[in-house]
Image (cartoon, rainbow, N blue to C red):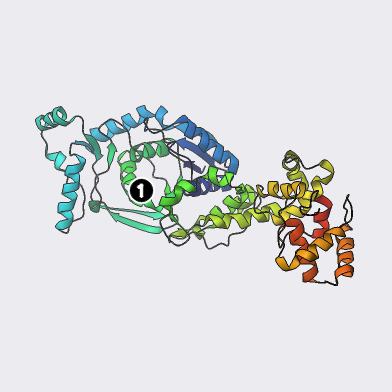
Amino acid sequence: MTVTRFAPSPTGFLHVGNLRTALFNHLIARKTGGTFILRIDDTDPERSKDSYVDAIKEDLDWLGLSWDRVERQSARMDLYAQAADDLRAMGRFYEAFETPVELDLKRKKQLNMGRPPVYDRAALDLSEAEKAAARAERGDGVWRFMLDQSRIEWTDGILGDISIDAASVSDPVLIRADGQVLYTLASIVDDTDMGVTHVVRGSDHVTNTATQIQMIKALGRTVPDFAHHSLLTGPQGEALSKRLGTLALRDLRENGVEPEALLSLMARLGSSQPVELQMSLDEITDGFDLAQFGAAPTKFDAEDLYPLTARKLHGLDFSAVANEISALGVPADKAELFWKITRENIKTRRDLAGWWSLFRDGAEPDIASEDKEFVAKAMTLLPDQPWGPKTWGDWTAAVKAATGRKGKGLFMPLRKAVTGQSRGPEMADVMQLIEVIRGRD
C-alpha cells in the first residue's frame, strides 16, 4: 500500500510552499487508495505550539485535504533515542564540541584553500579524557552521523537520476547539544517505522535526502521513493521566502480565495499541464501526474488565484450561497435575483457585501460636468417606486424623447449616476434591486 506523509512544524501558519508539499503527498495517496499521514514535527518544545497544530488542521480541513491519522513526533522520542544508540553501537555516531564560531573559521579556511567547506571530523581524534574535559568546559556536544564518503545515488520521482558525493557533505548533526532531536534523524525513523513508501518535498531537501538514504541503510531499513518538487518564486522570479508571511493560507482564505482555486493552481503549477479550474478534489486527484513536473523554479503569483476564484463563483447555483446572501440582509424575495446579477461581477464572496450596500444605500453618483443638466432632467423623469424589470427601458425611452440623447451618450451617464460605476450588471436588473438613488432629489 502507498503511504505518504505531510510533516509540518507547528511553529507558524501554513503557507503556499507548505501546501505544495502537503497537496502532492495527499494526491499520491488518494490516487492509489493509500494512506496519508499528518505528522506533526514538534520535537522543538520551545517553538512548537498547540495553537499552530490547530491552525494546521483548520487549513487542511478548509482545503479538504483529509488525513488518515495524526502522529506527533514529541510522543516518539524513545524511538529516536533507540536509533541513536544503534548508530553509536555500529560506530556511525560521534560527539563533537566545536562552537559555531570555530566551525565558521574552519569553513572560511577550507574555502580559502579551495576545498569544500565540510566538517573535518576533528572530534574523532579526541581521546576519552579530552572529551570529558570538553564536556566539563563547554557542556555536552552535538552528535553527528558519520557518512560513508562514497557516492549516494537514487532515481528521483521528479529530478531523475541523482548522484551526490558524500565526501562533499558534512557529517550531519542529528542531536543538538541541548538534546533536541533534529529533523534529519526523526524523519527517517518515522518514515521507516510508519512504512512511508513515497516522500515528496522541496528541492532544498536534496542533500538531506542523500544523507538520510545512508542513515536508513545503516539502520537496515527500507528506503522510500523520494521526489523533490521545484521551489516557488515570486512572479518576477524573486525569492518567495521573503514574502511567505503574507502568503499564509489563512490570509488567502480571509482575502476570499476559494479552496478549489488554490488547489487547482497548486496541483498544476510547474507542470506541463495547463492550469484549469477543477471543482472537486476527486477531479484534481484524477488529473494529477507527478511525472509532469519539472525541476526549474516555479513562479507563483497570488493574483492568479482570483480569476480562478471568480470562475468558480460564476458557476455556483443560488442554493450554494443562499445562507450568505440572507446573512447580508437581502430580502428573501430579492435574494435569488441579487445572486443572478452579482455573481458575474464579483472577484470573491467578499464583494457581495459591497453590492448589497450599493443597492440598499445607493452609490455615490459619478457625473461629469457636461452631464449635470442632462442627469438632473433625467431624474425628474424617473418613475416612482417600486421599480421592476421594465423600469430601465421605460425610463431611458422617456429621457431619450425629452433630451434627444441616444446610445452611449444616453445610457452611460445614467448608469454612472445610479451605480457610480461605468460597468456592471444589466441596468434592467439593477433597477429591480436598487432601493436608493442618491442625488435624485
Left or right, 42 with respect to 33, comes to: left
> Which residue is rendered at x = 86% and y = 59% of the image?
380
In the rendered view, would you say 153 is above or below 250? Answer: below
Q: Badge 1: few (under 14), some or many (20 or more) residues near its Cα, within 10 Å?
A: many
Amino acid marked by disc 1: Thr
Q: Is residue 227 visible?
A: no
Q: Is residue 391 visible?
A: yes
Q: Secondary structure at mark 1?
A: helix
Total number of numbered discs in the rendering: 1
Residue 287's image quarter? bottom right
What is the x, y in percent for residue 24? Answer: 51, 49
> Which residue is rendered at x = 72% and y = 57% of the image?
365
Which sits in the foreground, 211 or 411? 411
What is the x, y in percent for residue 232? Answer: 45, 55
In the rendered view, would you say 178 is above or below 123? Answer: above
What is the x, y in percent for residue 56? Answer: 51, 38
What is the x, y in percent for residue 145? Answer: 26, 40
Residue at mark 1: 209
